[in-house]
Structures are given as C-alpha cells and as structure tokens.
Amino acid sequence: MGRGVKVAVIGGVFAVMVGGAGYGAYNVVSALDGGGGSSGSETKSGPPGKDEVAETTEKFFTAWEKGDATTAASYTDNASVAGTLLTAYGEDAHITGVEITPGTAAGTSVPFTVKAKVSYEGTTKPLSYKSTLTVVRGETTGRALVDWDPAVVHPELKDGDTLVTTESATPQIQAVGRNGTVLSKEKYPSLGPVLARLREKYGDKAGGTPGVELAVRHTTTQAPDTPLLTLTEGKPGKLRTTLSASVQAAAEKAVKRYGESSVVAVKPSTGEVLAVANNREDGFNAAFQGKVAPGSTMKIITAAMLIDNGVTDMNGPAPCTDSAMWQGQTFKNLTGMKPDEGATLADTFMRSCNTGFIKLIDEVTDSSLTQEAQERFGLGQDDWQTGIVSFDGSVPASPGPDRAANAIGQGQVQMNPLNMASVTATAITGEFHQPYLVPFDLDGRKPATAKGLPKSTASQLKQMMRLTATAPQGTAVKAMSGLHGDIGAKTGSAEVDGNAVSDSWFTGFRDDVAAAAMVEGGGHGGDAAGPIVADVLRVGG
C-alpha cells in the first residue's frame, strides 16, 4: 500500500479518555440532542433495556450514515478512539453513501448490514458487509452506549488497524502450487497470512503492476495490508511456490479438528514445503513462527545425539524407570507407564519414556544437544531462508536441570511444526535440506546448510520411528493406523507453565512426505496432533 495517506490508529495507544466510559462524550451529545443524560435524575444501572438499545443504535447509525464521525463516536464508550477510526472511514478509506440496515436485536446485541460506495480518483465500487454491535451501560454516566470494538466498523478490523484506499505498494500476486494450481485465500483460508507475506516480499519481482484497493492497514503489528475491495485491477504477477494443492487442502481440513492448531508438511528429499496451515483466532502463522516447547518429539534429536556420541544405540540400554533424578530435579513418565529396567533405546523411544533418556544425559555435556541440533539438523542458527518470516528453532546449551529437561523437549528448547517436520525429514534421509516455500533463484537466497547424520544414525532413527508407528507398544500406532507405505512417527506432549493441559505434538512420515503438527492444550500427542498429521500424510504420501 502507498503510505501517502493519513493513518488513523485504533486502540488505546493515542487515546485519552476523560472521566469514565462515555463521560467525555456526554456533553457533546447533550448539546446535540437536548439531553438524555442524568442531569437532575438518578444515574441508571444494570443492562440497557430494549428501548435504550434501539435508541442508541439508531442514533449511532444515523450519525455514521451522515459521515458525522464525532457524533457517531459520542454514542460509544470510547469516543476518542472510535472517532479516529470513523473519521478515517470517510477520509482515508473514501467510503461514502453509507446505508445501514439493522437486524433483529438479541438482547443488547444488534446485527446489521452496511451498504456503501468506495470512490477514488474517478473510480467507484459498491461495498457491502455485515457486522454486529453491543450496547452497554456507561460506568460513569449510566448512559446506554455502543461497546466500542473496531470490528463494529468492519469485521476485519482489530485493535491497531485502520482503513485506507490507495494504490497498493506492491502488485497482487497469483500464487501457484507445484502443479500450477492457483492458491487463493478464498479456497485455502489459512494461507491468507502466508500469501500476504509472499506478496509483500515478491510482489515487485513477480512481473505484476499495482492496482487501487480498499484495505485494512495494520498500524500496530506492521503486518502486510489486508485487501478488502479492488477498485482498479492491477496485473497480478505469477509466483511459483512449492505448495501442493492437494496436501494443502488436506492440511486446511485437518487443522479444523482443533482450535489453536498448526501443521506443516515437507518433502524430505528436497526440503520443499508442501503445506502450511493454521487454525488460530489471532491469524498468527504459528506453523512457521511459533516458539514453544516441542515435548517428546525432541527425542528424535536426543536419540541422534546419544547414538552419535557413542552413548548407546537403538539396541543398547536405556532403562525406563519410574523416576529419574538429575541435579536435584525429579523427572517422571506419563501416568500409567510401566517401568522396564531392561529397555533398549528403541523400546524407550517408541514408548516415549522420559527417564530412559534422562539417565543417559550424564554421558554428554551441556552443549552436546545444541551441537547435534545445529550441526546435524540445521537448527538454531537463525539462517533459514524459507521465503517468508520463519523461526529456525532454539536449542540452547543449558546447565543444571535444564540439560535434562531440554533432552525431553522441555526446559529452554523452542520449536514449531516447520522445525519438527524438518527434523523428521533429516532423521529419515540423513540429509538436511532447508525447508523453503519459493525457489531460491527467485531472489538469490542462500539456503542454510548442515552436515546431516551418519547413515547408521539415520537408519536407526527411521527404524525407531517405524516401531513407534507400528509396534504394539508404540505411542503413535492409533493415530497412524490405516496408513500404508513406509511410515513412522514420534509423539510428544509439552507442559506449559500455567496451563492445566499440555500441548499436543506429533511428527511423522509416509514415504517421501514428512509432517508435524501442534495443538495448544491438546493433551497427549497421539490424541490431537496425531490425527492432523495422519490426515495430511494420507493425502501426501
């Protein structure tokens, strides 16, 4: 978007309320409508009545339709902030001819439809959308007021957003998948933020020309503008991506199983990202940018470290005891897990026994896991060039109890589904291929490198993941049941401070596709994240 327009900020950053909710606006309204306040009478309390809701709504809508931002804002409980946005609605967004049709009120909530026009430099387009407002009681004045929320003005608006109509800063893009399928946010909704980032970065490199748009400008988060209406068509540039339309469709459907979930699928032999999907209310691309503990999926890297440092191998000892003490901290297993003093590393891995790993941590150093993650798996060096903003994972060298906690994906370790899908890809191929969304030659990016794993280590990791997905005691058997081909997986659950239920993690592979998912508050890995990964692998394998 061009920046030569006045930017209106929503939110409390520049707003100063005078008195309580609605108090500063009261005098303005009294002067305009001849009263309606508490002068000489007792201040009302309790929820607004039906007549009050109707009266406040009508006055708010009437002023809004007239383009009288100050008066309309005075009927809200945050007049300063509301006035700034409503002013931008007419001046910066160039929206006129507003007609508002209220629906049937449900208590103090009123749905409504807005029909208007957007006019800019001789071009006019119709605009229509639905929204809802709620009427509340002003705490200080007792007046019935519109409960201010920027979504009242347009449902796409959040705190820190404004509306603008101007020439776009970058041309639109027509993102296409690996087989030429057009990837739109209408068909693949969770790709919206990804496509916006791709447009921001590559719009001027894809051969298009800019158009004129009504858009949401995110003045607080600095995220790319979100287009709402195109007034003048530019020429979209075609941008090739690595995404698979069929795998993306499966990922979109899979994350709908649970709120606050994310999944990524990659092609292990190349690093190409086949799908990225999020089901989150905040629109954050947690699949690429999340920074949270990965739980026992981290044991893939820990097992590799133990094998590469000669501590044990898949058939070597890794006793699974009830508990394990490490530098003053006691570590336990999932409730109900039976101990097995004679367990091998493969046994401990497929059952996801914490203590079997903790008991071997004394054989390595504080930095051993960090070195394994960086040098073998390409993690934690802040050098991935995926094509959009992403986080490369973090495995810090940690002294004390955190050395043990890191080994089981707690402590100070941070990952996201992109990282763990890549970990699985490296584990089963022995080679690190940095994940990417757009070709490197498009803008001369240099992929991150790592030396990968010895053949023997990769072979053992792949076999242990196979056992986890197929052996009777494997924690991933239920989630992966019904999948054919060469399959393997690792489950994880990560405890997060303050949360009663752990996060659910799962990573797996089927032939030449690897996928990883995370569900906040989803519990055990096989219960929530597991079915998401399985659904993606079912299509992608």
Image (cartoon, rainbow, N blue to C red):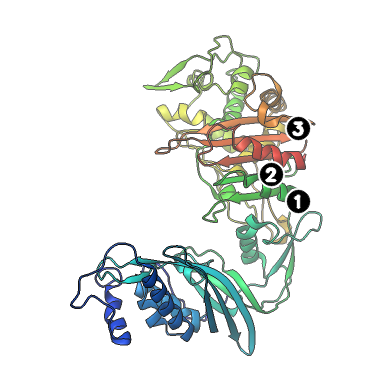
Describe the element under mark 2 as helix, strand or loop. strand
Describe the element under mark 1 as helix, strand or loop. loop
Which badge, 3 or 2, comes first in the chain's sequence? 2
Q: Residues within 10 Å of mark 2 (few under 14, many from 20)?
A: many
Describe the element under mark 3 as helix, strand or loop. loop
Residue 190: x, y in percent? 63, 55
| Front position in the image: 105 or 520 | 105
Labels 2 & 1 near each other (Cβ < 8 A):
yes
**What residue would you read off at disc 1?**
244
| Front position in the image: 313 or 415 | 415
Q: Quadrant of residue 79?
A: bottom left
Which badge, 2 or 1, comes first in the chain's sequence? 1
Residue 200: x, y in percent? 61, 66
Residue type pointed to by label 1:
Ser
Labels 3 & 2 near each other (Cβ < 8 A):
no
Q: Residue furthest top?
A: 342
Q: Is residue 458 visible to the viewer in this orientation of the structure?
A: yes
Residue 318: x, y in percent? 56, 15
**The N terminus: image quadrant:** bottom right
**The C terminus: image quadrant:** top right
* Residue at image point 35% right, 78% down: 74
* Residue at image point 64% right, 19% down: 473
- 539 with respect to 87 (left or right): right
Q: Residues within 10 Å of mark 1 (few under 14, many from 20)?
A: many
Q: Which numbered dot is residue 265?
A: 2
Residue type pointed to by label 2:
Ala
| Front position in the image: 284 or 361 | 284
**What residue would you read off at disc 3?**
483
Residue type pointed to by label 3:
Leu
Above or below 520: residue 159: below
Alpha-carbon span between mark 3 and mark 2: 16 Å
- 408 with respect to 465 (left or right): left
